[in-house]
Image (tube, helix red, strand yellow):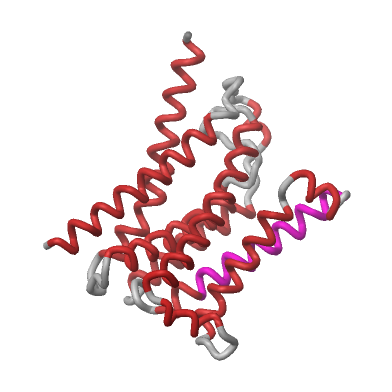
Amino acid sequence: MQAGRQSNVQAIKFSALLLLCLLTPLLLVSLAPAPAPIYTLWDWANVMGYMVLTLSLLLFVYRGRARSFPAFSGRFFANLHRDLGYIAMLLLTGHVAVLLWVEPLLLEHLKPSAPLHMLAGLFALLFMLMLVISSVPFLRRRLWPDYHRFRSVHALFAAVILGLTIYHVVMSGFYMNSEWKLAVLAVVGCCVAASAIRRERTVLLSGIIRIRNSAGYSHMITYCVTLLVLAASFFALLLQQAE
């Protein structure tokens, strides 16, 4: 019973952290100077886009290796990395699909003559689909029998996707429309890069008492928090439109 209580506490704390991470960029872009809302589905599709940017950054923080928080088993972190990747792919696909549905003229931005930042977003989607599909275990084992080679290629693709996503967001200039917002993004990017480069000391991780049978918490936390943010943002946009 004590272990179950500890698991629930850790899950709640990590859920709050993930929720904060997903909400922060949405709050950031809504601050002045904030662009006028267009209509609900359009703005909601862009919410998905900024969630993809956040998840892409988080994937470099939670790379499948155990960290000091939460105190879950190593399998939890492997599941977490995979789940965050799946969610990022789904949201990026949704971002593009919803925008094309509400504004079919955006198909022009899928042509070679499209602005470079729009092509960057398109290539980010294509590369992410390739990355996620090639990471499915039975395909991964066939494509890259050498796991270390897979990790190197995987990391390279992930870095390219993150770079394309940031370029797409920044050069679009619609929400990231001030120097201070760009400065915040730069600081966050540097912090994530530092986290990806730095390895937590073994002595730090070895002193943590891991909670067993905690791998399944990843699915519950990631998908529930994502759905909560999507639902909350959609209804917030509806209320904004009704004013």
Residue 18 included in the magenta stretch of the image: no
Image-quadrant location for residue 65 = top right
- Residue 41 is left or right of residue 156, and the answer is left
- Residue 221 is left or right of residue 238, and the answer is right
Looking at the rendering, the stretch of residues picked out in magenta corresponds to 146-167
Task: State the residue lying farthest toward the left.
Answer: 243
The residue sitting at 46% across, 19% down in the picture is 6
**Residue 69 vs residue 216, the one in the foreground:** 216
Residue 159 included in the magenta stretch of the image: yes
The residue sitting at 41% across, 32% down in the picture is 13
Q: Quadrant of the C terminus?
A: bottom left
The residue sitting at 62% across, 41% down in the picture is 200
Q: Is 90 placed above or below 180 here?
A: above
Task: State the residue lying farthest toward the top.
Answer: 1
- Residue 158 is left or right of residue 144, and the answer is left
The residue sitting at 57% across, 72% down in the picture is 164
Q: Is 117 placed above or below 64 here?
A: below
Residue 24: horizontal and vertical position, in percent? Answer: 35, 54
Residue 53: horizontal and vertical position, in percent? Answer: 48, 61
Image-quadrant location for residue 172 = bottom left
Q: Is 113 placed above or below 59 here?
A: below
Task: State the residue lying farthest toward the right.
Answer: 145
In this orientation, does residue 209 appear? no
**Dominant secondary structure of the magenta stretch?**
helix
